[in-house]
Amino acid sequence: MSLEDLDPQVAETLKSLHIDDEPANLSEVDIQQGIRMKDALGRWQSESFATLEVIRRRLLSDDPPTSPPEIAEVIAAVARFDGEDEFILPDLKAISQDILSRISPLPEMTRRETVSLVLSTHIKPLFLPTQHPMINQETGRKLHVQEGSRVAYPEFNDDQVWKTAGRGCWNTLRWTVSQLQRDDFEKLWPLLIPPLMTLLDDYQTIFRIKGIQVLHGLLEQVDGNLLKRTGIASLFSNSLLNSINRSTDPEIALILPLASRTLQMLIALTTEVGSRERFDQLCECLSTGIIGGVWIFAGENLEAMEASIETLLPLVEALDIGCCRYLKALVPQLAEVLAPKPFRPHSIRLINLSAGCLVRVITVCKPRIHAWKDVILDALLRSWVWAKEDAKTEEPGQDIGIHTT
């Protein structure tokens, strides 16, 4: 259904929200182009706010749009502003959330139809020029690629219309997923999975983060059997592991905790408690993502190290005594952080996180930890000495949180 088929006032209002073909990230343009783009973006933001105000007044009127096609058009126009992006000003986000709250939750009788219209009319066309090479676009299932054949990822990253003409489509996708119930997903699978996988495997970290946020919401509702039956569970897992392994990325501190938490949700949803499959997948997250990734390639990045230790604790909890196989990597790394060395970046937060994680490792690995008592005691003593010597220069209220009693 097109805008012309809708109520004339609603159609005219939504037409003004057309977005010209512009870069989605203003930091990627040169100075002169950036000035022009920011001027144009400012005008567009002002016009968008005025348009959203008209939509809100219409929803509050005696004759609000109620049919699924009309509500779908409103969602597509408004939900893009419900997110954390450079182009979303606080007032735009506030009014978009107010509008969405007035139509949410979607009526049960028309929910699936409304979301289907949003996805098929406004989301799917944006991603058709750059179809994910591992997804069947008609079924949303994993494509079985013959061994040795090449997957066309370079072409997949070319001509990404969804980043320009579809600015904010990732927010729309996230919002629509939040409206669905468990029994809706199978019917809408072919419309949900292709754009989601495109986001998850994008070469830019910021859009991977957007995709993981969508996936996190999806995993809170979807049936794990559907993920396994369609082969999508393995694609999700690979994408999340690749995001965790982006150790040299400047935004690793942002994506690492989010990707790790979401991967653990996926593992819990698609594997049995106590199974070898669950154990192996958790081990891969720990060994390739943190030990073999961040700790090797981003050891001088303070924010990345803090994120890695924050991510490590729930993995230690999940693996429990299985962490014993990684004591050779875990104990020296966590112990070394307790007593900062000259010319190496450190923070009170990193020390506290490492101390807490080390305590948990000691607890779950109790049968094997005795072999590491000298390393741990040496680190604690050195940390105590460092804390005493550094006490005069530390900010008031700072506490490294290490207790030797």
Image: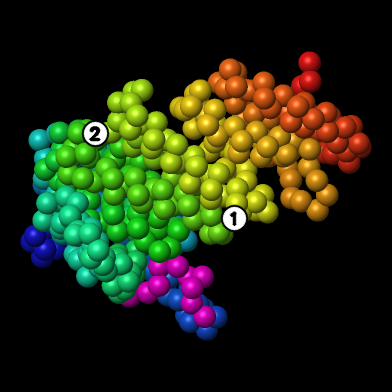
- Which quadrant is home to the N terminus? bottom left
Q: Main secondary structure of the magenta part?
A: loop
Q: Which residues are magenta?
A: 18-30
Residue under the point 19% across and 59% down: 146
Q: Amino acid at mark 2?
A: Gly
Q: Which mark is residue 14?
A: none
Q: Quadrant of residue 215?
A: top left
Q: Nearer the viewer, residue 343 or 306?
A: 343
Asked if residue 107 is positioned above or below residue 57 in the image, the reply reads: above
- Which quadrant is home to the C terminus? top right
Q: Does the magenta run of residues contain 29?
A: yes
- Relative placement, left or right, of 252 versus 399 is left
- Could you tell me if residue 53 is visible in this image? no
Residue under the point 18% across and 55% down: 143
Asked if residue 330 is positioned above or below residue 198 in the image, the reply reads: above
Q: Secondary structure at mark 1?
A: helix
Relative image position of residue 118 (x, y in whole percent) = 19, 53
Q: Amino acid at mark 1?
A: Phe
Q: Which residue is mark 1?
A: 297
